[in-house]
Amino acid sequence: MPLLSARPKGIALTEKQKIAWLRLIRSDNVGPATFRDLINQFGSAETALAVLPELSARGGGTRPIRVASEAEALRELEIAERFGARFIGIGEPDYPHVLRAIHGAPPLLAIKGDPGVLRHPAVAIVGARNASISGMKLAAMVAQHCGRSGYTIISGLARGIDTAAHRASLATGTIAVIAGGLDRPYPPENIPLLHEIWNGNGVAISEMPFGWEPRARDFPRRNRLIAGIGLGLVVVEAATRSGSLISARLAGENGRLVFAVPGSPLDPRAGGTNLLLKDGAIIVTAPEDVTEALAPMAEPDLFRQTVAKESEPTSRPISSLPDDSDRDRIVTALGTTPVEVDDIIRHTGLTASSVYLVLLELDMAGRLHRHEGGLVSMSMGTD
């Protein structure tokens, strides 16, 4: 059946823009959402880089902000090239289409392997690391069926269900999302599998710098990419406290279909999947259950969304700066409880541009915390 036969062509970044993008995302206090706001506010990464210290100072920063240098960016690009990898930007043709639509989509992804698999609709398959034989068999069956139906399989290269899903889709296309740098895969025993993926009909991706050793908090970050690239997410086995349930929640919040395989109430590996089914996940008793439910979603324009685009670099100054009283009103309105930016605008009566600029100042100063769904709060320990 035809699946996602058309997609946005995208616009390739120039080498100069890619260096500036890499510098910006590697600078202090700049995450994906902040990166987008900086580009939207100042027009280009190059202009944003020039004003980061000023933003941090106006936001009450207590120490100079570290801005990644051009030499650092060039060094990372050289490391990527030696490794056989490259970077793709959010507006470029090979960037996964539906990932662009999630909040906090990475502005740059490091990839190694066949980028062609990123152009096909994807299904995520996740589950327990200590999976049962039957669980791994079912994960493989779902992966093979979805692969034959035109879907790329995406997972996190973990033991158990992830491994079974990747292996079953090596022939049809698979995406491995790495929690650390591309050169720091985890777990070590799956490195041979990773080599099969990027040397064959598959690709590995990461948003983290080369050389970055994955930490516990990096795996939920990875999970949002797994959930964001797939049109749907299938949980085969998962305990009630499981990273797979985080992936399922993120998938649901981003409008993806969530599937779960039922299991025995006596098996702790079924606790999470059975809980998902109680919460409305789609039951999977055969691989066809997945493709039949996903068919209406495999439309070219379903997740089309305008992304941050930068103009030619300019040296325009910051105009219409909020004054100190405006900043005080915004800081007073914020607390440690996450709120929507629109609520801040309504509460303070200030213009949206003023509010967004002050939030960027607080962000660069390390005083703002960004939450899922675009919510913001003051960081703990700040006024």
Image (spheres, rainbow, N blue to C red):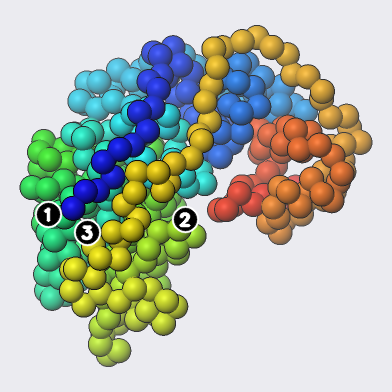
Reading the image, the residue beneath label 3 is: 162
User: Residue 336: where, in percent of width, then height?
Assistant: 72, 56
Vertical position of residue 227 compared to residue 131: above or below? above
The number of discs equals 3
Q: Identify the mark nearer the N-term, 2 or 3.
A: 3
User: Residue 50: where, in percent of width, then height?
Assistant: 63, 16
**Location of residue 284 by image quarter:** bottom left
Instruction: Return the residue found at the far top.
Output: 315
Q: Identify the mark nearer the N-term, 3 or 1.
A: 1
Reading the image, the residue beneath label 1 is: 148
* Residue 137 at least partly seen: yes
- Residue type indicated by callout 1: Arg
Q: Residue at 41% across / 19% down in the picture?
A: 13
Looking at the rendered structure, the secondary structure element under dot 1 is helix
Is residue 229 found left or right of 66 in the rendered image? Answer: left
Q: Residue at 69% across / 12% down in the picture?
A: 316
Q: Identify the mark nearer the N-term, 2 or 1.
A: 1
Measure how far apart labels 2 and 3 are at the Cα level.
21 Å
Looking at the rendered structure, the secondary structure element under dot 2 is loop
Reading the image, the residue beneath label 2 is: 254
Q: Nearer the viewer, residue 49 or 316?
A: 316
Measure how far apart labels 2 and 1 are at the Cα level.
26 Å
